[in-house]
Amino acid sequence: MKKIPIAFILSLFLISCFQATTALSDQPTQDSKELRLQDMLMNLLSPYIDKDLHNYYYPKIFSDFSPSVAPWKIEVIETKRVNGFRGFILDITFEIEPTDGGHWVSIGKDRMTYRISYGPEVKLINHTHLATYKYPPE
């Protein structure tokens, strides 16, 4: 008789744990057209991001190395058209966690907005440094 309430409580616990872990996981688990387009955009923008992060971090914050960007450490926050429907001037804002480039240790967090227009022209229009992480000693 005690087995039924215990089994019921155990099943409720397992269901609530499963729901909590799926609610917390906002990372994609399968490929999609949107994800592929986002990854292609990050590949194309990474040289600009690397250059701008290098100018910010090196040597002011870290003088031993220049930061590097791992594409999986870039999260798109917002995209918008500047000049209306089908206008080809677009802004993209994302948060980045640059790394040391060797061991992939995150060294900070930044929010950057780029304006992308026909040509192509890519211009940094806003860079907000959100955090500097303590780099572990060797």
Image (cartoon, rainbow, N blue to C red):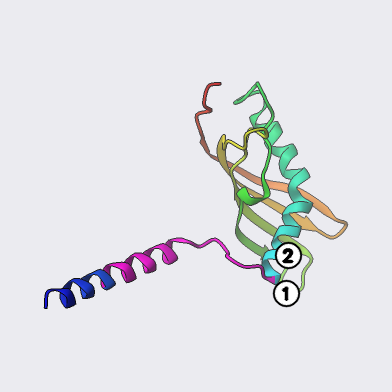
91 horizontally vs 110: left or right: right
At 18% from the left edge and 71% from the top edge, which residue is drawn? 6
Work out which residue is located at the far left of the displayed protein and give it.
1
Tell whether position 10 is magenta. no
- What stretch of residues is rendered in magenta? 12-32
At 75% from the left edge and 50% from the top edge, which residue is drawn? 45
Specify the label residue 130 is tagged with.
Answer: none
**Toward the viewer: 9 or 133?**
9
Q: Is residue 81 visible?
A: no
Specify the label residue 37 is tagged with.
Answer: 2
Front of the two marks 1 and 2: 2
**At which x and y percent is residue 33?**
71, 71
* Residue 137 vertical placement versus 68 (above, below): above
Tell whether position 15 is magenta. yes
| Total number of numbered discs in the rendering | 2
Badge 2 crowding class, 10 Å Cα cut-off, few under 14, some 14 to 19, many 20 or more, is few
**At which x and y percent is residue 120?**
85, 56
Badge 1 crowding class, 10 Å Cα cut-off, few under 14, some 14 to 19, many 20 or more, is few
Amino acid found under the numbered disc labelled 2:
Leu
Mark 1: which secondary structure? loop
Task: Kindly identify which residue carries mark 1.
Answer: 85
Q: Is residue 67 visible?
A: yes
* Residue 8 vertical placement versus 101 (above, below): below
* Residue 1 vertical placement versus 41 (above, below): below
Is the N terminus in the top left, top right, bottom left or bottom right quadrant? bottom left
At 53% from the left edge and 22% from the top edge, which residue is drawn? 137
Gap between marks 1 and 2, in whole Å? Answer: 19 Å
**At which x and y percent is residue 58?**
67, 27
Residue 109 placement: quadrant: top right
Is the C terminus in the top left, top right, bottom left or bottom right quadrant? top right
